[in-house]
Amino acid sequence: MMQELQQRIGYAFDNPELLTLALTHPSLGKGGSNQRLEFLGDAVLGMAVAAMLYDLYPSEQEGELARRHAALVRGETLTQIAAGIGLGDCLLMAASEKQGGGRDNASNLEDALEALIGAIYLDGGMEAAQRFIAPRWRELAEKIIAPPKDAKTALQEWAQARGLAIPVYRIVETTGPAHAPVFTIEVSLAGHAPATAKAASKRLAEQLAAEALLKKLMQNA
């Protein structure tokens, strides 16, 4: 199964233990999991996609590029790509997690894909990681004709179109060490239940919270 996955992604690991670790779900609880590689892969992916967009859209300003970037590194995009390479079938997890649908769980797929990118980076460097990322994310990037609206703008426009006051954002809590804080942000809108999100920056947490509230509003529309 590991060999088949390497063939599908077009990369052969010099250190196959890195691949095994990238596919190891925390539910196994022994010998480590893919969480640290997930952290690394998230950063590598963000950098690679940013560089790709910089080259693809030389006339766009920072805000436009940022909105494209957010759309390409969001959870739904990662889940789509992970499913496309059959990553779920390769995950190593506890029987209980597997029986609970863990191989198809969006969060598990997203985490494993980021961990896989982190593992490729450690095994072959940034160039190898970019060779994995470029064709998959470039195809998606080129389908986005215009920069998507950021979630905060979209939520505000949704509220104003219905005569509601603008959304209100507040910090619920800040956790983690001073050099790497994690912010929990709540966004509220009159007449609707609030939504919260966590991120390493207030700006990103606000965007994620707005995105979560928008999703709920659309489902209830």
Image (cartoon, rainbow, N blue to C red):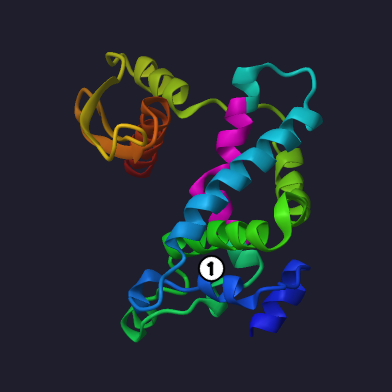
Q: Residue, x 66% and y 61% (percent of image)?
A: 120
Residue 122 seen: yes
Query: Does 46 sit left or right of 208 as displayed?
Result: right
Task: Examine the rendered structure and indicate whether residue 140 appears above or below residue 19.
Answer: above
Q: What amino acid type should be assigned to the residue bearing mark 1?
A: Ala
Q: Residue, x 59% and y 57% (percent of image)?
A: 118
User: Is residue 77 inside the magenta stretch?
Assistant: yes
User: Is residue 188 inside the magenta stretch?
Assistant: no
Instruction: Please state which of residues 129 and 188 is positioned toward the viewer in this rendering.
Output: 129
* Position in image of residue 18 (x %, y %): 59, 70
* Magenta stretch, main secondary structure class: helix
Instruction: Please state which of residues 160 and 27 is positioned toward the viewer in this rendering.
Output: 27
* Position in image of residue 187 (x %, y %): 27, 28
Q: Mark 1 falls on what kind of element?
A: helix
Instruction: Please state which of residues 175 and 177 is positioned toward the viewer in this rendering.
Output: 177
* Position in image of residue 61 (x %, y %): 68, 16
Mark 1 nearby-residue class (10 Å; few <14, some 14–19, many ≥20): many
**Residue under circle 1?**
22
Task: Examine the rendered structure and indicate whether residue 94 appears above or below residue 153.
Answer: below
Quarter of the C terminus within the rendering? top left
Q: Residue, x 44% and y 64% (percent of image)?
A: 108
> Quadrant of residue 220 in the image?
top left
Q: Over which residues does the magenta segment extend?
A: 66-81
Query: Does 186 sit left or right of 155 as displayed?
Result: left
Instruction: Please state which of residues 153 and 185 is positioned toward the viewer in this rendering.
Output: 185
Task: Examine the rendered structure and indicate whether residue 114 appears above or below residue 177.
Answer: below
Residue 217 seen: no
Query: Does 183 sit left or right of 147 as displayed?
Result: left
* Position in image of residue 149 (x %, y %): 55, 25
Quarter of the N terminus within the rendering? bottom right
Q: Residue, x 67% and y 40% (percent of image)?
A: 49
